[in-house]
Image (cartoon, rainbow, N blue to C red):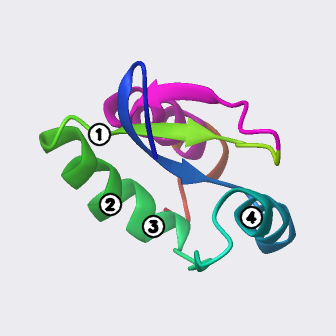
């Protein structure tokens, strides 16, 4: 998606949220799952290098919170290290 703050990749925590928003905003769009590990270790660093933000919880009305990919990666990494350090 593109907006006033630049390009952003929309992300949702569950397929059901994504499906309803995609159907409303991008009728020809497709929902694709990504593992948390792939998101943190691969996708977010790539987005950060390209200066592409992340639209979190984009709703069917198009409203969302936009973070930089680096900000989201930092928040997720901190949370995972604090709560799941043995598994991640």
Magenta-span inclusion, residue 54: no
Q: Would you say the residues marked 2 and 3 are in contact, meaning their CB atoms lie under 8 Å apart? A: no
Left or right side of 54 for 27? right
**Marked residue nearer the N-terminal end (2 or 4):** 4
Residue where numbered disc 1 is placed: 52
Question: Residue 32 or 72: which is nearer the viewer?
Answer: 32
* Callout 3 secondary element: helix
Which residue is label 4 attached to? 18
Tag 4 secondary structure? helix
Task: Determine the residue positioned at 46% across, 41% down.
Answer: 77
Q: Please tell me how crowded label 1 is: few (under 14), some (14-19), or many (20+) other residues with Cα within 10 Å.
A: many
Mark 2 or 4: in front is 4
Categorize mark 3 by other alpha carbons within 10 Å: few (<14), some (14-19), many (20+). few
Q: Residue tagged by mark 3?
A: 37
Q: Nearer the viewer, mark 3 or mark 1?
A: 1
Q: Estimate the spatial distance between the alpha carbons at disc 2 and disc 3, rounded to whole Å.
A: 9 Å
- Residue ranking furthest to the left: 49
Q: Is residue 25 above or below residue 36?
A: above
The residue tagged 2 is 43
| Mark 2 or mark 3, earlier in chain | 3
For the point 73% across and 30% down, which residue is it? Answer: 63
């Amino acid at each position: 998606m593109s907006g006033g703050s630049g390009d952003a990749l929309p992300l949702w925590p569950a397929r059901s949220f994504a499906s309803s928003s995609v159907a409303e905003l991008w009728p020809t769009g497709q929902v694709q799952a990504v593992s948390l590990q792939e998101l943190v270790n691969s996708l977010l660093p790539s987005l950060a290098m390209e200066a592409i933000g992340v639209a979190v919880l984009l709703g069917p009305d198009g409203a969302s919170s936009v973070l930089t990919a680096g900000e989201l990666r930092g928040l997720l990494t901190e949370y995972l290290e604090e709560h799941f350090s043995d598994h991640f």
